[in-house]
Image: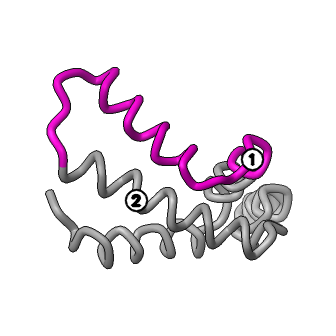
């Protein structure tokens, strides 16, 4: 039973990509890391009157990256699967806004 469970878990990990890096263009990845970090710093360091205003500011900061809608969507999808990409964004947030609360 235990070996069967391990096989099922292994198969699920392989099917899920096993945390592997997505094939994202390095320029797109770099622009996304910068834009995502900037957007997160913005919403961490500024007070917004409404949730809608916060959402608009965050969305506009991402759009300001110059990435196409397709590239932005691909980067956001890659971030869901790529731990290294998420860590790069996190490190960039700390570098830009010092982990502001």
Q: How is the image coloured?
A: one colour
SS type, badge 1: loop
Residue in the image at 21% along x and 73% along y: 98
SS type, badge 2: helix
Q: Which residues are magenta?
A: 46-73
Please indicate, yes or no, whether residue 76 appears anywhere in the rendered image.
Answer: yes
Whether residue 39 is situated above or below residue 26 in the rendered picture: above
The rendered magenta stretch, by its main secondary structure, is classed as: helix
Residue in the image at 83% along x and 64% along y: 14
Magenta region includes residue 22: no
Residue 73 image offset from top left, x and y in percent: 71, 44
Give the left or right position of residue 13, taking residue 41 as reference. Answer: right
Residue in the image at 31% along x and 72% along y: 96
Residue 47: quarter of image: top left
Please indicate, yes or no, whether residue 3 appears anywhere in the rendered image.
Answer: no
Residue 7 image offset from top left, x and y in percent: 82, 64
Residue highlighted by disc 2: 38
**Residue 68, label in figure:** 1
Q: Quadrant of the C terminus?
A: bottom left
């Amino acid at each position: 039973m235990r070996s069967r469970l391990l096989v099922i878990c292994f198969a699920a990990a392989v099917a899920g990509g096993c945390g592997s890096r997505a094939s994202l263009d390095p320029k797109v990845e770099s622009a996304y890391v910068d834009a995502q970090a900037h957007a997160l710093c913005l919403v961490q360091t500024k007070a917004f009157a409404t949730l809608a205003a916060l959402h608009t500011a965050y969305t506009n900061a991402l759009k300001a990256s110059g990435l196409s809608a397709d590239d932005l969507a691909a980067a956001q999808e890659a971030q869901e699967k790529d731990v290294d990409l998420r860590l790069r964004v996190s490190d960039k947030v700390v570098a830009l806004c010092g982990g502001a609360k």
